[in-house]
Amino acid sequence: MKSEIKRLRSSIYVTNSFYLFDGKGHALIIDPAESFSKAESILEGNIPTAIYLTHGHFDHTYDCELFRQKYGTKVFIHELDEKYLSDHRYHSPNGIPSGYEDRIITADGTFKDGDSFTFGEDTFSVIHTPGHTEGSCCFYTENVLFSGDTLFKGSIGRTDFPLGCNDADMPNSLRKITKTVTDDTVIYPGHGFQSVMSEEKKFNPYLLLFL
């Protein structure tokens, strides 16, 4: 992978936001969460041209519109999760925590399984991984996987929310990931710490159960 990666952690459920830099003044954000107030220190003058969302839960999407207003940043999400951006029943299944707004977000475009997008010299494949939400996705390029809330270090995303979750889909999504990415792939998850696919295959109890 050619792009530089930096991580910010949100105070909403300690969500990870990933900022990618192409070395030519542009940035791409994966799941901005609540990171806008910290963005200036990490952007260092780079302009965020696009936001790609791994899914539509508000703890991953919260500051999208702030980036759009300031930088004109475009927002993209899987077509099945687009409705999450404007419907709190989907984007906040446990209710909106005290002190936070029910923000309406508009997508500039949608993607689906097998699509790809390019940033700088990197091309990312979209892997549709339903389970946590209908349109959950992972983004994969050159031994790097942004796994959202599908796969964590030692765990997986929840599948017990009343709308959008499907625990029957999750095993197939996990199998799909392991068949697609290489064992030396570095995993950047939506929460928690990064890992490597080979380690997850050895120690993640859910992968051991489903593979």
Image (spheres, rainbow, N blue to C red):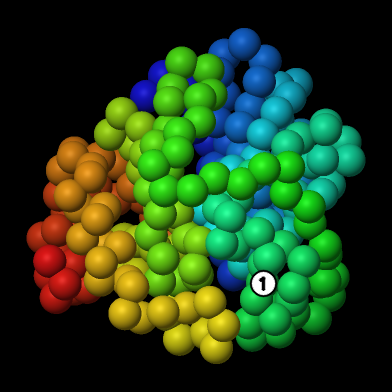
Relative placement, left or right, of 142 versus 124 is: left
For residue 97, above or below residue 50: below
What residue do we see at 82% from left, 40% from top? 68
For residue 101, above or below residue 53: below
Residue density around tag 1, few if under 14, some if 14–19, many if 20 or more, within 10 Å: many
Circle 1 SS class:
helix
Relative placement, left or right, of 42 versus 206 is: right
Percent position of residue 90, x then y:
65, 76
Relative placement, left or right, of 209 versus 102 is: left
For residue 186, above or below residue 2: below
Percent position of residue 148, x then y:
46, 56
Disc 1 target residue: 91
What residue do we see at 66% from left, 49% from top? 32
Which residue, as the protein is rendered here, is positioned at the far top? 24
Task: Report the quarter where the C terminus lies.
Answer: bottom left
Task: Report the quarter where the N terminus lies.
Answer: top left
Percent position of residue 145, x then y:
36, 43
Kind of residue at badge 1: His
Task: Please identify the quarter of the rendering in which residue 132 is found.
Answer: bottom left
What residue do we see at 68% from left, 65% from top? 83
Which residue, as the protein is rendered here, is positioned at the far right? 69
What residue do we see at 42% from left, 48% from top? 113
Which of the two residues, 186 or 53, is positioned nearer the viewer here? Answer: 53
For residue 165, above or below residue 195: below
